[in-house]
Amino acid sequence: MKKSKFPLPPRYRIYLSLTVVMVIILFVNIFVTAAIINDKEIYEFSSYDWHYFIFFIISELLIGLLMFFFGTKAGKIMRQVDKQKDKQKYEQFKYAGVEPGDYDYVWFDFSGEERAKVLKQDDVFLLYVEAFDVRSEIWTSVNTVSCFDSIDAVKKSLFYDFDFYCDENALLDEHGDEMFRQ
């Protein structure tokens, strides 16, 4: 049996199973209630039937809430696994298309989804910003080439113009917000 690099934890299967069980109970509850009240119309209900009907409504709501809770938990686990897969893919293709010596600087943003390539030609700095597409596994250009007269101007442009936050141009404050590094 082939083992996955990102196996789903047993909790995922438990939550998914509980969600399926809640769906089954939801429908069984409908048929049981219909059998108890003998398929009567609402205007034909006796007080006995009304008690079962109110119990049915409350139980359906509770089962629906439990179903939502377990489904949300399973979805959260799946999103974490997908995020882990995307991060590994990003690491695998981090330097794709960049040969040693091609650029003077290659910076990666905090989110791990963009990279900035800086090349110095004479006294001008050329900036290329690219975003990683996880599905196609390629880096796509975010901008055409931008020219700057200093590396500080490149850092400032990355921060303010491209919302590109990396170790070279930004700091994270205690709230996780980015601040421009002077």
Image (tube, rainbow, N blue to C red):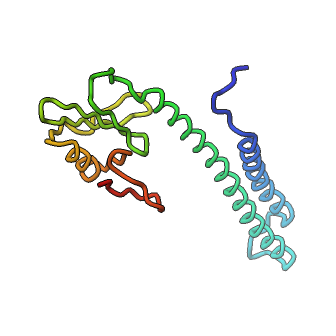
x, y percent for residue 60: 74, 63
**Left or right: 179, with 24 as reference point:** left
Q: Quadrant of residue 52?
A: bottom right
Q: Quadrant of the C terminus?
A: bottom left
The residue lying at 74 percent from left, 68 percent from top is: 57
x, y percent for residue 61: 71, 65
x, y percent for residue 26: 75, 56
The residue lying at 35 percent from left, 48 percent from top is: 165
In the displayed orientation, state which residue is furthest to the bottom: 47
The residue lying at 27 percent from left, 30 percent from top is: 104
Of the pair 36 and 176, the residue shown nearer to us: 176
Task: Look at the picture and state if 102 lies above or below 174.
Answer: above
Q: Quadrant of residue 40?
A: bottom right
Task: Look at the picture and state if 84 lies above or below 169.
Answer: above
The answer, for residue 136, to whether it is visible in the render is no
Task: Look at the picture and state if 163 lies above or below 120.
Answer: below
Q: Quadrant of the N terminus?
A: top right
Task: Look at the picture and state if 102 lies above or below 156.
Answer: above
**Left or right: 6, with 155 as reference point:** right
